[in-house]
Amino acid sequence: MRLTRFTDVALRVLMRLAVVEGGDPPTTREVAATMRVPYTHAAKIVARLQHLGLVEARRGRGGGLTLTGAGRSASVGALARELEGPGDVVECEGDTPCPLRSACVLRTALRDAQEAFYATLDPVTVGDLVASPTGPLLIGISGGRPAGS
């Protein structure tokens, strides 16, 4: 199972926001630079996370990005499902549909494996992802203050 780059970066953005509290919240541009992704890609991710209620974004002076309570407690498995969207691991219906699709055991097995992958991530929260040693490393990378300080 492999996550898309969009989901990977979205989880990293949430992790970045989970370790900084107080002071000036980081901007999308700052988060993009820290995560080493193009600003336009980060902006799309932030917009999606904001739409999901996980991130608050404020413009202008004193603006920036903050993680919501829902963002901190969000299940990584649920986030991966949401961000990846519906779909199977393999493409059975493409331009040249697979001749086995009507009686394929492989497709069902792969769908079950995909759900098992997500289920393994279900009990893990964004807050869990920034426990030591990851949280202190993220703080160092971002130059921010630890959450709760």
Image: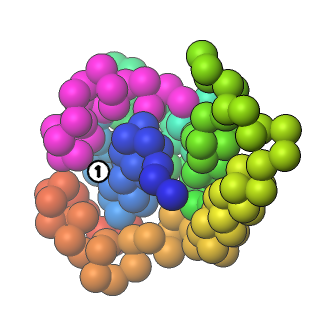
* Main secondary structure type of the part rendered in magenta: helix
Q: How many marks?
A: 1
Depth order, front residue of 79/145: 79
Please tell me whether residue 12 belongs to the stretch shown in magenta: no
SS under mark 1:
loop
Please tell me whether residue 31 belongs to the stretch shown in magenta: yes
Question: In screen coordinates, is 144 left or right of 11?
Answer: left
- Where, by quadrant of the figure, is residue 50 drawn? top right
Amino acid tagged 1 = Gly
In percent of width and height, residue 21 lies at: 37, 58
Looking at the image, can residue 59 be seen? yes
In percent of width and height, residue 67 lies at: 49, 49
Vertically, is 34 above or below 142?
above
Quadrant that contains the C terminus: bottom left
Q: Residue at x 22, y 36 (%)?
A: 37
Q: Residue at x 26, y 41 (%)?
A: 31
Depth order, front residue of 90/34: 90
Q: Residue at x 40, y 49 (%)?
A: 8
Depth order, front residue of 119/111: 111
Residue that mark 1 sits on: 23
Vertically, is 4 above or below 28?
below
Q: Mark 1 packing: few (<14 Cα in 10 Å), some, or many (20+)?
A: few
Residues drawn in magenta:
28-48
Outermost residue toward the right? 102
Outermost residue toward the bottom? 132
